[in-house]
Amino acid sequence: MLNSLIKHSNSSLWLKQTLSWNGLNQIKRFYDQKVVDHFENPRNVGALDKKKQSVGSGIVGALACGDVMRLDVDIDDEGVIKQAVFKTFGCGSAIASSSLATELIKGKSVDEAMGVTNTEIANELSLPPVKLHCSMLAQDAIRAAICNWKEKNPNHVCVCGPEIAMSPKKNRIIFNLYLATDPKKNKQFQLLYMKKVICFFLFLFILILCCECADQSKFKLCSQSTFCENNREIRKNGSGPRFSFVPSSAKIDENKNLFQVDLLRFDELEPKLFLEISSVIPGVVRVKINEKDPDLNRYQVEGVLLTENFNYQNAEIVTQNEEFVLLRFGSEKEKHVDVKLFYGPSWKIEILNSDGEKIIVLNHDSLFNFEMDKKDFLLNKEKQKEDKKEEKKDPGKEKEEEKEEEKEKEKEKEEEKEEEKNQEDDQPNYEERFGGNTDSRPYGPSSVALDVLFPDTEHIYGLPEHSTKLSLEDTEEGEPFRLYNVDILEYETESRMSLYGSIPVIISKPNNQKTLHGIFWFNPSDTWIDISTQEAQTKTKLFGKNSHVSKRAHWMSETGVIDLFIMTGQEGKMYQVFEMYDTLTGFPYFPPSFSVAYHQCRWSYKTQKEIQNLNEKFDEYDIPVDVFWMDVDHTDGKKYFTFDPRTYPDPKQLSKTVSEKGRQLVAIVDPHIKKENSWELYKEAQSNDYFIKKSDGQTDYEGHCWPGTSKWPDFLNPKVIEWWSSRFSYDKYEGSTNNMHIWNDMNEPAIFNGPEMSIPRDTIHLGEIEHRNIHNSYGLFVTKGTFEGLIKRNKNQNERPFILTRSFFAGSQRYCTIWTGDNMANWDQLKYTESMLLSLGLAGAPLSGEDTGGFLNNPDEELFSRWFQTFAFHPFFRSHSHTDTKRREPWVFGDPYTSIIRESIKIRYSLLPFYYTQFYKASTKGKPIMRPLWLVFPEDVNLLNEEVENFSYMVSSSILISPISEKNQRSKEVYLPKGNWYDFHTLERINSKGKSYKIDAPLEKIPIFYRGGKIVPRKMRVRRSSRLMENDPITLFVFLDENKKSSGTIFIDDGHSYDFKNSKKYIHQKIIFQNNKLFTKTFHSNYDPALIERILIFGLDQTPKNIMDNNNQDLIFNIDENMDMITIKMPNLSIGHDWQIFIQ
Amino acid sequence: MLIFFFGTLNSQTDQSFFQIFSDQQMFCFCKGFILFLTSLIVSSYCCQAAIVGIDPSLASHYSDPKTFTCLDNSKTIPKSYVNDNYCDCEDGSDEPGTSACPKGNFYCHNEGLLSKSIPSSRVNDGICDCCSGEDEVSGKVKCTNTCKELYLDQISDQLKEQEIQEEGYKLRLEIRKETNEKKQYLQEQIEITKEEYEKAEQESEKMSEKQQVCEKWIYAQKKNRKKVLKKMIQERLVSKNMEIANSEEKNDKDFCFLHKDPKIKKITKEFKNLFFGAAKKELEDLKKKIIREKSSMFTEKRNKKTEKEKFEKIGDLDLGIDNEFYYLFDNCIEYKENKYTYEVCPFDKVTQKENGNTYKLGNFKQWGELTNQESDSDNDNENENENEKKNAKANKEQMEFTGGDKCWNGPNRSTTVLLKCGLKNEIKNVQEVSICKYQMTLLTPIVCEKPKNKITIPDLTTNQEKKNIHDEL
C-alpha cells in the first residue's frame, strides 16, 4: 500500500514524509540492526587534509543514484592505514557501509585494505540484495582513496583505478547535504540530537526513495534524454528540418532491385543523405536512409537480419513526374507492392498494396530528423562563437582607451579565459549527464527520427517489452514507449518504461480488414516511440462524411540509420506478417520437448542436495516436473562455468540422478566475467583482449555485478562469440552434461553501478564501435554465443539447445526462450502478464513465459494457485522466486492449494502433444502460440474492444483461457465468439451467439474452453516427467463446430535432436472430421507411430449405430448422451498411419 | 477360476495389447498350465495372483469370472476389460496392472517383503519402482530384483536404530536416575534460592534503611556544621559589621551586600576550611562506603533473584518423568556447517554465528508444534494459557524457539528443534526450511524409547522354501 501510494503520488514530498512515519516500523524490519546501529552511530566521520602527502582521498558514487561516499585515509610510511574517515550522503545502507569500511581498514596494510571486498561488508551488515551496491560503493571508496594515496606516493603502483572515482570538485553541493556528524563532541549534543532526528527522517525519506521508487529515478525520462527531448520538440514545433528528394538523382540500380535517391536539407547545397527502397522479400519493403559520404556512414549492426533469406524483388518505375515517382516491386500480379514517393519539400512515402490502398505512410507529418555528425555541429558552434566575440569586442574598444593599464591586466585574464575556452572549444561539450554518470558523446548528436502513419487503423500492437495493455495507447500525455534494455528489479504495470528486452516491431490491424501489417524499425540504439491518434474526415460519394481514425508512431533513435521494413499483409491472411518478419529475422528456434513441460526454479537451490531432495519430493507429492534450475549461487564465487565445490561437489552425479527420472538441469551463465587474475577463463579473455573497452578505447571497462568487479566480453567480436561458445564444451565447462541447459541472465547487460543499471554508452566495441550503436542487441549476441556453444558441445552437433534469456532483440527468437524478468507477486502483475506475452508473440517471439508465482514478494495461496491455473497454458512454464521470499514449492501451501497446483501442472502435461505441435508450428510458420482473440476471430469487431480483449486469450486457435486475476473472484463474464465452445473441465457445450457468458470459477478452476472445429491431441497418462510419457498412447479430443467439422494437426519426433530436420525423422499429420468421417492427411510420416488409445467426439448431435474403421472392423464405442460425447475405445490406430473412421 | 483364466488368455490374443502381462503373469500362465493338469486348488491360488497389480485386500472384488464392477460402483464391465490397458472406471480400479488410469494404483507385491502401492502412472515408465521390478514389464528396462537386499538393508538399519534405542534407553534411565536424584535437590534449590533471595531482599532493605539513616545523619551533620559555621560567621560578621556600620554608617540595604566585602569573604573562607576540609572528606567517604555496600547488596540480590528465577523456571518447565530433561538444561550444543556455527541451548535459545556475527535464531517458546496463529504472530503473550495447557500434553520430541533476530525483509528468525534418539547430545543437521525458519535435529539419549517389538533378522530361506513347496505341489 505504502509502495503503491508513493508511486502514484506525483512526488509529493509532504505525502512521502507523512507516510514515512507510518513506514517506520516497516523500515526497521527491513534492515539488520547493524545497519541501523552504524547509521545512528557512524564511526569515523570526518575528513582529512587532502593536501598532506600521507592522505589519500576517494570519492565515489553518484548523487542521482542516491549515494555519494568520500573516504579519506592517512597512511604511514610502512603503508599501514593509521586513520580512515568518511563522509557519505546517501541512504542508511550507504552510511553504514562506509562506517564499517573505515572500521575494517583501520590498522590494515594498504594491500590488505585493497582486498576488502563488498561481500565482506555486505555480509557483515546483512545488506539486502537491492542494497548491495552500497557495499560496492564502500569497496570502491576504499580503493579510490588508496589509489589517490598511491598517486601521491608513486613508488606504489596503482592497480585499481575505479571507473567511478570522480574529482571532489564536481560534487561540492553534495556535501552540503551530507548527513552524518561527529557524535563525540558533547557540547553539540543537543544539536546533534536534532540532527540525528532530522537525519533519521531524511534517512527514512531517502530509504523510501531508494527502496520503493529508485527504479524510476534510475532510468531516464524522455526529458532527460537530449535526443528524445529534441525530437519531441520538433513535433511540438510542427516539423523537423526540411528535406526534399533530388529528383534528378532518382535511379534504379543495375540489378533492378534498389531504388535510390538523394535527400537534401533545405539549408545545404549538397545532399548529405540518400534513401534506398527495395523489396527484400515479396511483400516486404525496406526503406533505408544513410549518410552519403562513405566516411561518415553510420554503423549498422550485423547478425540480426538473415540476409541469406533475402530475395530481392524486381523494382520498376511505373510513373514519374516532378511531384512524385511511383515504384513497383515484384512482378507477380497480385503480390506486388507499390511505393509512391513524393519528392518534397514535404517529402513522404506511401506504401500501397496491390489494390492501391495506402497501407503505411512514412513522414506523413514531416517529423523526419537526421542529426548529422559532429562536424556539422562544430561548424555551427564556431559560427555562433565568432558572432558572439564580435559582439563583445565593440563595446570593449571604447573602454580600452580609457583605462589602458587595467585593461592590459584584464586582457591577460581574458586571454587566459579564452585559452580555457578555446581548449573547451576544441572539445565541444556534448556530454550528457544522468544519474551521476557522464556520457561523453564524443561524436555528438546523431539521432534519427521518422513518423509512420497507419491509415484507417484504430489498433496497433507490439513494441515489447512493456507491461502495458496490448493495444498501444497514445503517449502524447506522458512518456513515450521506450526501447532500451535495462535491468529493472520491481517493474510496474501500465508503464511505458523500458524493460529487459526490446523488439522494435509494430503490428497494425487496419479497421474492417482481415489482415495485419507490420513495421520493423531496425535500430538497436536507445529508441523512444510516441503513439498518437489522428482523425480525418473524408467525403465519399455514397455515404457522405466518413471519419477515419489513424494511428501514428513517431520513432526516435539515438543513433544509427533509418532502416525500416514494412511488411504488408494481404486481405484474408492474418498470419502472413509473422512469416515475413521471421524470414527477415529468423523463425523461432525449436527447443527440446522437455522445455514445453514444467520448470522448477528458485534463487537459489543452494546445494546439490536440495535439488536431489526436490527430485524426490515432486514424486512424493505426485507432481510432474521436468527441469530443475540452478541460479547464481551454484557457481564458485559467481564465476560462471564453475560449480561451488562445497555446495555442488558433484554436478555430474546430480545430473545423472535427475536424468534417471527423465529430468533436466538448467545452469545460469551470465555475461559478466569476474575480474580475478587467477581464474583461467578470465585470464584467457584478458590475454586475448576480449573485453569491452572504456571510452578511451584502450583499457577494459570494469563494473559491478554479482561477483563484484567484473568485465563484459565484447560479443560484437566474432572471435569472442567463438570463444564464448567454446567454453560450453564438456571438458571446459567442468561438471556440465548433456542434460544441463543454459540460462543467460543479466545480459542487457545489467551493471549495478552503471548508468541506468547498464553499461556506459560511450564504451567501445571492436572496430571502435560505440556501445550506444548496438545496445539493445547485446543480449541477442550473448544468446547467439551460447546457442552455438550448446550446438558445438555435442560431437554430432545434432542436439537442440534450450536457452532462456532475459534480454532480447529482434532475432532472439532464433536462439532462445524469453521470460519477462523480475515480476512481483501481486494480482496486477498476473493480469498484465498475458498482454506482455501476447505482445511478444505478435512481435515474433512466441516462446515466452513469466515467473509463475511472481519473483518478488510472497504470494498468498489464492494468488499462487490462480497463477498456476493460467500460467500452465503459457508457452514457457516456470516457477521462480526471489531468495528473500518464503519457500513456495508446489506443496508448501498444502491442500486444497497443492491439489490445485498439481492439477494445473497435470493438465499441462496432458496437453504436451498439442503444445509441442504448436512449438513446431511456431518454428516453421512464425505463428504466435498465445494469441489475442481478435487474431483468431478477425471478423468479430467486439473483440477489438479493450474490455473483451484483455480478458481472454487463445492458445493457438484451439483453446480459450480466461484468467482469473482478482482476489476472491469466483465467476467471470467470458466473451465467447460465435460458434461452439466446450468447457475444458466439464466438456459441456455452449453454442455462443458471440456474447459474454457468466462462467463459474471456483478456486479449483478458471474458465477454459475448447473451440468447436478443433481437434486436440492429449496424453492422458501423466507421468513424473515428459520423457517418461514419450511412448504413451494418444487421446484425440474431436470438437465439432456447427457444421459438424473439425480438424487438428500433430507433430511427433524424438523431442531432442535435429533429426527432424537433418534426416526428416518426424510425423506431421492432419486429422480431419467431416461428413461423419474422421480421417488423416499425412504431410510427412517417418517416425515411430504413436498409438491412439481413445477418440472422443463432441457435438455430433446424433446417435451413431456403428463406427467402423477402413478395414470395416467395428470399433467399440459408447455414448454419453447428456454430454453428447462419443468415446471410441482403443481403435487400434496410430498417428503416423493413414486411416479413416466412419460413423453411421 | 478356469474360465477366468482363459478369459485373460483370450483378451490377450483378441486384442493384442502390449504391456499387459507381467513376468509374473507369464510365470503364472506356465505354472497355471501345469497346475491345471495337477490340481484345481493350486490353480486358484495362481489365478488370483494373475491379475497384476491388485492389492491382496481387494482381491475378492476381482473374483467374479464374467464381470467386474468398479470399486466406486460406477459401472460394471466385462471381466476382459480388467487390465486391458484402457481405463473404464473413473476410479481406475479396472486397471490395477497398467498405466491406463490416471487415478489408479499398482500394488507391488515385492515377494511379500516390502509390498507397497504406487500410482499407476509409474507402471511401465522405464523406472523400476517396485524392488521386484514387477511394475516394469514392457521391456523398456530390465529391473533387477533388489527386494532382498533392500529388505535386509532396511532390517539392518532398523537393527542399528534398535541398538541405538536400546543403548540410548539405558542411558536415559541412568540420566533419569540422576535427574531424579536431583529432583530433591532442585526442589530444595527452589526453596533455598527463594529463601536466599528473600533474605537478600530483606538485607538489602535493611541496608536501604541503614543508608537512609546514615544519609540523614550525614545530612544532619552537614546541616549542623553549616549551622555552626553560619552562626560563627554571623557572629564574626556582626562584630565586623558593627565595626563597619559604625565606621561608615551604611544604609540597611547595603548591609545585604556586605558578604561581598573581600574581608568578609576571607573570613568565610577561613571558616569553611576549618569546618569542611577534613570533616567533609570523612563524611563523603562514609557515604561512598554505604553506597558501595548497598550496591554489592543489590548485586547479590539480583544474583539470587536470577538464580531463584532459574530454578523457578525449571520448576515451571515440563521436564518429563523424573525431571529427565533437566539433562539438557544448561547444556549448549554446537554445530558447524560451512561458515556457520550453530548453538542450541535447550530451554534457552538458538544462535548462529558467522564471521563473528551472532544472530539469535529464537528463544525457547514451548514444547511441541506451534499453531498457525502462534507462528504468524510475534506476540509472545497471546494464548499463554493455552500454551501451558498444551505444554502439559505436548510431545517431547520437538522444541520451538521463536522471536529471534529479525530478517531484513522477512519474519523474526525462528527454529524448530527435533529431538531424536542418539547416544550423546549432538546436532545432526540444520536446515533453513523457509526464509529465516530453521529446523535442526538434535540427537540425545533423553528421547530414546524402549523398543516395543524387538526386530529380529528374518529367516528369508524359509520363505523361499515355502514357495518351493508350493511349486512342487
Image (cartoon, rainbow, N blue to C red):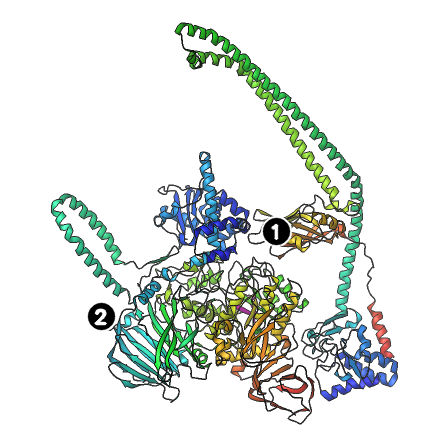
Q: Is B63 on the left or on the right of A386, as rendered?
A: right
- The span shown in magenta is A734-742
Q: Quadrant of residue A693?
A: bottom left
Q: Position of residue A1012 (x, y in %)?
A: 58, 82
Q: Tell me which chain the residue with mark 1 is part of.
A: B
* Magenta span: chief secondary structure: loop
Q: Residue furthest front?
A: A544
Of the numbered discs in the image, which one, if any, rests on residue A1037? none
Label 1, secondary structure: give it.
Answer: loop
Q: Is residue A1093 visible?
A: no
Report crowding for label 1: few under 14, some 14 to 19, many 20 or more residues within 10 A (C-alpha). Answer: many
Residue B313 against residue A1032 in the figure, above or below: above
Query: Is residue A986 inside the magenta stretch?
Result: no
Which amino acid does the dot numbered 1 rest on? Arg
Q: Residue furthest left?
A: A401
Q: Position of residue B202 (x, y in %)?
A: 70, 28
Front residue of this view, candidates B256 and B156: B256
Q: Tell me which chain the residue with mark 2 is part of.
A: A
Q: Quadrant of the C terminus of chain A?
A: bottom right
Q: Is A22 on the left or on the right of A151, as rendered?
A: right
Estimate the spatial distance between the alpha carbons at disc 1 and disc 2, rounded to whole Å. Answer: 72 Å
Which amino acid does the dot numbered 2 rest on? Glu
Residue A90 against residue A978 in the figure, above or below: above
- CB within 8 Å, label 1 to label 2: no
Q: Is residue B104 visible?
A: yes
Residue denoted by label 1: B413
Q: Is B318 on the left or on the right of A922, as rendered?
A: right
Front residue of this view, candidates B51 and A155: B51
Residue denoted by label 2: A268
